Amino acid sequence: MKKLKEFPYSRILVLGLAKSGTAAAKLLLENDRIVRVNDIQASEEDETVSKLKSLGAELILGSHPLFVLDDIEIVVKNPGIPYENPILVEAEKRGIPIITEIELAYLLTEGLLIGVTGSNGKTTTTTLITEMLSKSDQPVKVAGNIGLVATEIAQTLTEEEHLVMELSSFQLMGTEQFRPNIAVLLNIYEAHLDYHKTMDNYRTAKYNIFKNQSSGDYLVYNADDPILSEAVLTSNAMLIPFSVKKRLEEGAWLDDEWIYFRGEKVVNRKDIVLVGEHNLENILAAAAAAKISGASNEGINKVLATFTGVKHRLQFIRNHYGRLFYNDSKATNILATQKALASFKQPVILLAGGLDRGNEFTDLIPYLTCVKMMVTFGETRKKLKETAKLADIDVIMTENIHQAVEKAYKHSEEGDVILLSPACASWDQYRTFEQRGDMFIQAVHTLL
């Protein structure tokens, strides 16, 4: 078992369990730390709770009393817990540091660490980098916001293995020493303002990916974003830009025929099977990070000639009597749905809806030109119905994914795309966007 290095804290509060909190508590206990766990939803009967108790953890469940901070030196919080939580407010008053589980993973990682963040495209880019390195015979593992707990993966790494981490703004807010050798910053659009409150706060969280980098590190960034291009100038890392709009000497770019990195032809665009113009940004970013990490052109080509997308991100499900079903459940904001819609030229029946965060959906209207019908569900179904009416598009309101699939198929014709791209988070009806996407897939297969 790997031991934590450069972690000078003896008494730790783990706030919130779920997967990352449980893994963090277990790691700390195995490293002979005194661990107190506070979770408002877990119960004494949970198998996870019993396991942590057997390892020596102190568990305070069902509420957030302030005394859980007594004698505590640092808080490891679940990323989803907002900083308005009374425990975190009090911890800040007392000057107690607050981190997330990725900080612990960083302290366990001895090999090359690649971190990927952005409002959209994180999972696709993270997966592409991992596959490009693997196909280039580079030892590599993947973890983080992609669904694999970072500390669990980091404990299994050898010094020779690379670690690619997908990083959310929630995770990056809780960083002290965290420092990827290669940071990838894809884009920043308005998202998660219910959590961050302002765009400045959201951007600051994302910029934490490079705040500790030094001159020996690399920062791959989107040179087509003027705000990002200015922000990265504060970084000490070597800047590696990528662009779909202009030729670059030091970074990744493209023309009508080729993908280039530092002037070298890497892959012919006709060999790329991943759909969507927005994915060209992800491909450029991934190719740049992979090349810096030692990937070969042959390995990159093998991936791009076969990779059709990650699950829940414009994932092709099946063709049934000329109807093409796509699962884009990971589209949890308007921008992601805009990009999904821009990927299709044929008629689309759009399934959309979910958690109501208070925003309107009029920004979708310019992207609805190929949409022949909208089927809405969840808390935002009425708002999206009004958007469809403004765009002069037929609309049907339903309660859930299963009903939406049935109605969409009933009103479809040969040649139509039936696209789940919700433009909303899933938490009104489904625990995660993965569960929502799985329900869509199940509904499609049940229907057919």
Image (cartoon, rainbow, N blue to C red):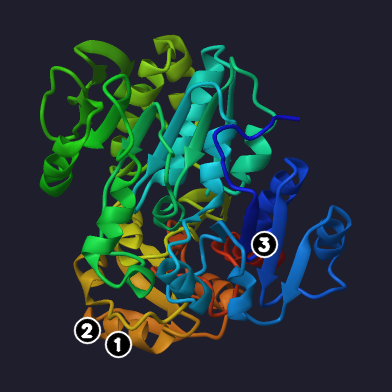
Q: In which quarter of the image is residue 390?
A: bottom left
The disc placed on residue 390 is 2
Contact between labelled residues 2 and 1, with CB atoms less than 8 Å apart: yes
Q: Is residue 431 left or right of residue 269?
A: right
**Mark 3 surroundings: few (<14), some (14-19) or many (≥20) residues within 10 A:** some
**Mark 2 surroundings: few (<14), some (14-19) or many (≥20) residues within 10 A:** few
Q: In front here: 303 or 290?
A: 290
The amino acid type, in three-letter code, at marker 3 is Ala
Q: Name the residue that disc number 1 marks.
A: 386
Q: In which quarter of the image is residue 65?
A: bottom right
The disc placed on residue 125 is none
Label 3 to label 1: alpha-carbon separation: 37 Å
Per the image, label 2 sits on a secondary structure element best described as helix
Residue at 59% across, 32% down: 5
**Mark 1 surroundings: few (<14), some (14-19) or many (≥20) residues within 10 A:** some
Q: Name the residue that disc number 3 marks.
A: 18
Label 2 to label 3: alpha-carbon separation: 41 Å
Residue 115 horizontal/vertical position (percent) = 42, 36
The amino acid type, in three-letter code, at marker 2 is Leu
Q: In this view, does 114 lie to the left or right of 249?
A: right
Q: Is residue 236 left or right of residue 295?
A: left
Per the image, label 1 sits on a secondary structure element best described as helix
Residue at 54% across, 70% down: 409
Q: Residue 233: tell me if it is visible.
A: yes
Residue 419 horizontal/vertical position (percent) = 45, 62
Residue at 44% across, 10% down: 298
Q: Which of disc 1 and disc 3 is earlier in sequence?
A: 3
Label 1 to label 2: alpha-carbon separation: 6 Å
Q: In front here: 135 or 211?
A: 211
Q: Residue 274: tell me if it is visible.
A: no
Label 2 vs label 3, nearer the camera: 3
Residue 27 horizontal/vertical position (percent) = 71, 44
